[in-house]
Image (spheres, rainbow, N blue to C red):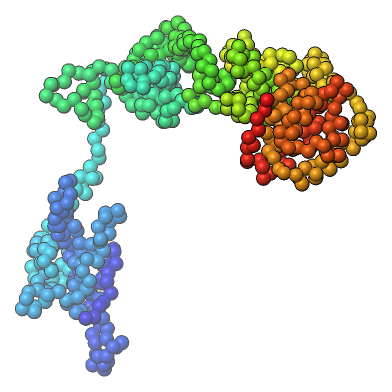
Amino acid sequence: MSSGPEPGPGIRPGTGTGPPIGPELPFLPGCAIKDPTVLKFDAYFQEEVPISAEEHYRIRQVGIYYYLEDDSMCIIEPKVKNSGLLQGKLMKRHRVPKNEQGDYYHWKDLNLGIDLTIYGRTYRLVNCDSFTKVFLESQGIEVNPPEELVSDPYTEQRRTPVQKLIVPTGPDPFRQFLIYDTKVLRFYAIWDDTNCAFGDHHPCVIHYFLADDTVEVREVHRRNDGRDPFPVLMRRQRLPKIFVDKNKDFPSCVLEITDHEVQEWYSPKDFGIGKTVTLLGRTFLIYDCDKFTQDFYREKYGITDFQPVDVNKKPLEKAPQVIPPYNGFGIPEDSLQNCLSLFPKPPRKDIIKMLENNLKVLRYQVALESPVPEDKNRRFILSYFLSDDTISIYEPPVKNSGITGGKYLKRTKVTKPGSTPEDPIYYEASDFTIGSTIEVFGHRFVIIDADEYVLNYLERNAESFPAATVQSIRDHFLPRKVTVETTSSGIPKKDLDDLIVEVQKELRLQQPFNTRQFHEAFHHFDKEGSGFLDKTTFLNICDRFNVPTSTILLKKLTDYCSCDDNKVNYRDFLLAFPSNLFPEAEGKDQQIILC
């Protein structure tokens, strides 16, 4: 199928038919001369629009071109900008079938005022150009009168100018916007929500926009107030003040509120300091406003009183905390923490003091002051820990005494008599002197002896202790400080350590015995705790434990520990009998009868 030149918009073909083709030119490609004559008809067709509510059908205007050189046809629709339709060439150039018998449309079938059906679409031919009319009339065809080209009704409707709405006489909202744009009334209010569960007083800011009479409510958040930081409590909108009477059958829950449902809207006259306004079911008490709002009300309404309303909560009277009496369990500071906190914490300790006085312990021998005869001869070791001022009491077990020894008081702080749980006063190192009485939870103990470390520590830190305390310990140790350069056997004192080493070597060759019981026997007979025993008792105890005092070394040691008044310092003598002298005999108790 050959294709000829298609006429462009506004171009009409000439009326000549071209020069005749002579016999001298062969009918070959490139030698044939095309006939540029074309018949052009103006037509339209109607297209249904089933998916639009604004139009049910659409009229589309087209141009039908018939090419005389090869009896082909094409249909072109002029393009309209922003039409949303696929326009341009609706049917490409080709010979168009006329019926099912194989016939094709011929120019003789075309005329004005007829319906032309092509591929199921009916076109109404309403007009043609002058060349087409002259050609048809020259061929003996009577051309029908032209018809008016039908326009699309929806397009004509869009071309109709929109009528302006007539605004009734009243306030001009545009004028109000121009005058009051960016001018906002600001009120400070309190939203009282205490009627609800976990309700509270919420500070808010109410903005009234004068440009369009809308209202916005913002909640004021503070750090750590326990609420989610939503900036807007009520979005900007017109708020109804009074509704019209509704029909009882009309549903009360609606999505939007129209003007005919509201009798009166909120206006600036409804707001003011001290007034209570209900906005969408929430009640707000206005207690203050900013300076611009004050100037606005002063100028427009003549209001001059802008005294803020005091909405600050009165501080609740704090009830005095009553500390219950001390129950005697633990130390008062530790028990007090249960009254101050739901999750008690241990009392703070003086870390510096604990580090400086670590492992520093003052030991005293104390006697129990009791009217019970069995308690008269009971002796205890009182240990005072300098790191935390705590006290522990230990009773050395004594065989056949009928009293179980061991730990008498675990390590704890001890208050002085007369102190209160609110202001406890604890025993200090300066309170322990020879002969003083220490009251421990209702039990009275008398200090009768002290460790030599106590004397050394007090003398090194004499500036931290009263002079009476230091002098008491010195006077107690004075009889032991008598310097004896030589003993009766002529042994120098500086050789005491060497003598003890030799004695221990000799004792290891003898029958082993329990040295702990050996020590307890001497303490048992020393009723006064002086550290001295008469020589007869001393030798009797040694015989009970089969200690060979008649040997040369032990006799020298006994003579060294003897005094002029027929007394023996058994404490110096016991230096040669440490607890680890006979390890194999420590777990074995000897049946020794002490008289």
State the image coordinates of residue 35 (x, y, percent, origin top left).
Answer: 24, 79
Q: Residue at x 64, y 17 (%)?
A: 376
Does 288 sit left or right of 432 as displayed? left
Q: Position of residue 373 (x, y in %)?
A: 61, 15
Quarter of the rendering containing residue 12: bottom left
- Can residue 355 be seen by looking at this rendering? no
Observer able to see residue 479: yes
Depth check, front residue: 445 or 34:
445
Residue 357 position (above or below residue 197): below
Q: Residue furthest left?
A: 101
Residue at image location 12% in from the left, 61% down from the top: 124
Q: Is residue 144 left or right of residue 306?
A: left
Is 70 placed above or below 79 here? Answer: below
Q: Quadrant of residue 334?
A: top right
Q: Is residue 220 left or right of residue 278?
A: right
Image quadrant in which you'd find residue 94: bottom left
Q: Nearer the viewer, residue 391 or 26?
A: 391
- Identify the image quadrant of the N terminus: bottom left
